[in-house]
Image (tube, rainbow, N blue to C red):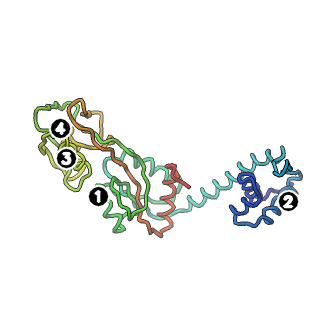
C-alpha cells in the first residue's frame, strides 16, 4: 500500500480553503501549475478523482470530501508532533519575573504550561515589585516578566485585567466620619497613585496608617486591621473583605497584568518560551 504525501495533502487543503488553484499557490508560494501537478499526483496516489466541474467551478467529489476530513487530521497530528519535539528539545535557563500579588494566581499556570511543553528548560523565578522588575528586564537580569507597568519599547501582551479594590481585614471597623487610614507601599506604586487620585477627586480625607516596601508588609498590616489598602483582587484572602461605594469609597480603575520581553531578544529559547505562553493565552497568529 502506498503512503500519502503530506505535502500534497497540505496543497489539497489550501486549494479547498481558498477555492482556487491560483490562490492556493499564492498562499503556499507555488505557481498555479505546481499546484495543479500536486493535485494530479495526489489523485494518482488515492486512485480516485477529488474534484469535479460544476459550471465554471471545481467542487470536491464525495471521495474528495472524505479525504479532506482525514487530511486535516493527518496534518494536525504531524504539526503537533513536530511542535512537541521542537519544544521538548528546548534546554537552558529561563528567568521569569513576577509581582508578589500574582505569584500564586496568574504565574503558576504559565510556569506549568512552559514546564509541560519544554521539560528540559530550567526556570528561575524572581518575585518582586512591578517597577523594579521592569528595570531588571531592561538591564537583562531577567528574560521575561509579568508586570502592571506599560512600556512601548517592550514587546508583550495582556494576560488579565483585574479590578482594584479597597481591601481590609474581615474584622476592620470602617468609620466614614474619620480620615481613611491607608496602608500604602512606598513609591513608585500604581496602586498608591490610583488610591490618592480617587480620594482627591471624591474629596475624602485620608491618613497614612502604615507604609511598606513590599506586599508582604502590606498583607501583614491589612490582616492586623491597621487600615485599608488599594490592591488588585488577587490579594484578597479569606480573612479579608472589600469596602466599596456603599461604604462611601470611590471606585478604583482596573489594572492589567502584561507579559513583557525585550523586543530585540535574539535568544531562541526566550523567544520560543514567550510564544508558547502567547499561544496558550489565545494570542497566536
Q: Is tag 1's residue or tag 3's residue first in the polypeptide sequence?
A: 1
- Identify the element where label 3 is drawn: helix
Instruction: Give me the disc on residue 230.
Output: none
Instruction: Give me the disc on residue 131.
Output: 1
Q: Give the vertical position of 272 relative to 46 (above or below).
A: below
- How many labels, in total? 4
Q: Give the vertical position of 148 relative to 226 (above or below).
A: below
In what quadrant of the picture does the C terminus appear?
bottom right
Residue found at the very far front of the displayed protein: 56
In what quadrant of the picture does the N terminus appear?
bottom right
Q: Nearer the viewer, mark 4 or mark 3?
A: 3
277 left or right of 208 in image: right
The residue carrying mark 2 is 40
Rendered location of residue 136, percent (x, y):
32, 64
Q: Nearer the viewer, residue 91 or 264?
A: 264
**Structural crowding at the residue carrying mark 1, measured as other residues with C-alpha within 10 Å and reported as few (<14), some (14–19) or many (≥20):** some
Q: Nearer the viewer, residue 116 or 131?
A: 131
Spatial CA distance of label 1 from label 4 is 27 Å
Q: Is tag 4's residue or tag 3's residue first in the polypeptide sequence?
A: 3
Residue at the image position 23 percent from the left and 50 percent from the top: 193
The residue carrying mark 4 is 224
Q: Is tag 1's residue or tag 4's residue first in the polypeptide sequence?
A: 1
47 left or right of 195 in image: right
The residue carrying mark 3 is 196
Amino acid at each position: 500500500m502506498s503512503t500519502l504525501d503530506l505535502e500534497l495533502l497540505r496543497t489539497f487543503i489550501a486549494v479547498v480553503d481558498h477555492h482556487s488553484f491560483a490562490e492556493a499557490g499564492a498562499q503556499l508560494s507555488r505557481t498555479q501549475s505546481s499546484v495543479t501537478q500536486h493535485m494530479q499526483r495526489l489523485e494518482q496516489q488515492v486512485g480516485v478523482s477529488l474534484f469535479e466541474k460544476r459550471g465554471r467551478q471545481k467542487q470536491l467529489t464525495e471521495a474528495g470530501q472524505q479525504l479532506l476530513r482525514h487530511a486535516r487530521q493527518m496534518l494536525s497530528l504531524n504539526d503537533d508532533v513536530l511542535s512537541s519535539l521542537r519544544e521538548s528539545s528546548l534546554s537552558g535557563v529561563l528567568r521569569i519575573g513576577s509581582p508578589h500579588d500574582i505569584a500564586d494566581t496568574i504565574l503558576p499556570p504559565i510556569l506549568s504550561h512552559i514546564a509541560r511543553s519544554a521539560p528540559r528548560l530550567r526556570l528561575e523565578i524572581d518575585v518582586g515589585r512591578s517597577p523594579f522588575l521592569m528595570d531588571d528586564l531592561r538591564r537583562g537580569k531577567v528574560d521575561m516578566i509579568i508586570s502592571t507597568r506599560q512600556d512601548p519599547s517592550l514587546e508583550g501582551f495582556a494576560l488579565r485585567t483585574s479590578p482594584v479594590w479597597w481591601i481590609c481585614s474581615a474584622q476592620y471597623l470602617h468609620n466614614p466620619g474619620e480620615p481613611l487610614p491607608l496602608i500604602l507601599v512606598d513609591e513608585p506604586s500604581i496602586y498608591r497613585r490610583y488610591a490618592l487620585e480617587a480620594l482627591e477627586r471624591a474629596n475624602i480625607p485620608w491618613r497614612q496608617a502604615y507604609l511598606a516596601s513590599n506586599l508582604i508588609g502590606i498583607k501583614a498590616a491589612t490582616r492586623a486591621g491597621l487600615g485599608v489598602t488599594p490592591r488588585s483582587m488577587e490579594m484578597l484572602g479569606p480573612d479579608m473583605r472589600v469596602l466599596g461605594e456603599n461604604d462611601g469609597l470611590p471606585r478604583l480603575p482596573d489594572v492589567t497584568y502584561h507579559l513583557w520581553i525585550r523586543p530585540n531578544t535574539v535568544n531562541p529559547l526566550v523567544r520560543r518560551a514567550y510564544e508558547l505562553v502567547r499561544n496558550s493565552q489565545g494570542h497566536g497568529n
